[in-house]
Image: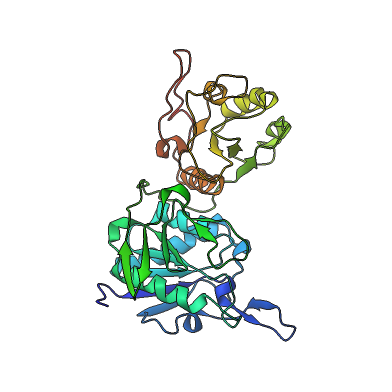
Amino acid sequence: MNDTRPVALVAVGGTIAMGAQKDGLVAPARRAGAIARGAAFVATADFRPHPVPSPHLTLDDCVELAAIVQEHLDADRGVVVATGTDTLEEVAFSLELQVRGPVVVTGSMRAPDAPGSDADANVLAAWTVAATVPADIGVTVVLADEVHSAGRARKLDSASVSAFSSGSAGLVGRVAEGALVLLNRPATAWPRIAACAPVPAVALVTAAIGDDAAWAEHVEAAGYRGVVYEAFGGGHWHPAAGARLAVLASRLPVVVTTRTANGPLFRATYDFPGSERDLLRAGVLFADGLDGAKARVLVALALSAGISPASFLRRQRPCDDELVDRVGEFPG
């Protein structure tokens, strides 16, 4: 394989950094040097003195991580970030919004010393992609020899080594015979956000049958500066939730995604109380192509940079003359 650039490893933690204890359970144990074995990294660095279980990470950590990654990119290196799979998709998308260059995020579903571990194979595949991927592809996620865009990668299984999927968007590429094979280019190139800590709190709420959104009356008092609402289907909610969310949307960004893994948000298909037309009338923003977790990352990082999340979302398409396009209305 012809390498086109040197690659650095930044080790965060997660299962890929864990080892077996005397009782047989796994816990953080491996540092960057151990994770890097078998791949020709020119530099390795630990994000923390000790590996971090990925559920412990925050968006403030993601801002700090982006700064470390940028230092390696400025030195004309590709970067592999090894982290836990529980929050890997959010870590990857946060990097997609903050840095530009050949950055690959990987992890493992099985600990390195577990039977059939995928740890070393994933690190080697990630190194292969970081060394050769075109820099304008953006941040990618590499596990099980599959290459996903950071904006589409999603963990859909709690245990399988093939846990990650890009859904209907499809893979960016694959690693085969020690080389990267590109299949697609990501459909969306997200503008860069100069995020800074502390990152404001943004709530993520999923629609459920009969939910009247009574929680919306307490969002601001709890300290949240934005809400991401995973609506039913193509953008629907219980009609009892509408009035509360409309009031909330007049005061802070309310961004809607679908709670399904795939498919678009509708604009002009259904017309009933609680349909997508009601959402548009309520002044919410639609985050097409993002699941709720990634939409929350976008909203929070945008607010941290003092800009409106609407600047990074598609402009709404009013379904009648009385609807107001709210893009750009919310203060940073």
In what quadrant of the picture does the N terminus appear?
A: bottom left
Q: Residue at x 55, y 78 (%)?
A: 117
Q: Is residue 28 above or below residue 237?
A: below
Whole-percent x and y of residue 44? Answer: 42, 78
Q: Nearer the viewer, residue 159 or 327?
A: 159
Please say whether residue 49 is visible from this viewpoint: no
Q: Indicate left or right for 128 with 303 as reference.
A: left
Residue 60 against residue 224 in the figure, above or below: below
Q: Quadrant of residue 327?
A: top left
Image coordinates of residue 90 in percent, x first then y, are: 52, 55
Above or below 122: residue 256: above
Q: Nearer the viewer, residue 28 or 113?
A: 113
Query: Which residue is painted at 51% across and 48% down in the image?
Result: 294
Quarter of image, res 246: top right
Which residue is drawn at the image coordinates 41% and 76% (left, top)? 124
How many numbered marks are there?
Answer: 0
Residue 269 x %, y %: 50, 24
The spot of residue 136 in percent (x, y) is 29, 56
- Taking the image as drawn, is residue 116 in sight? yes
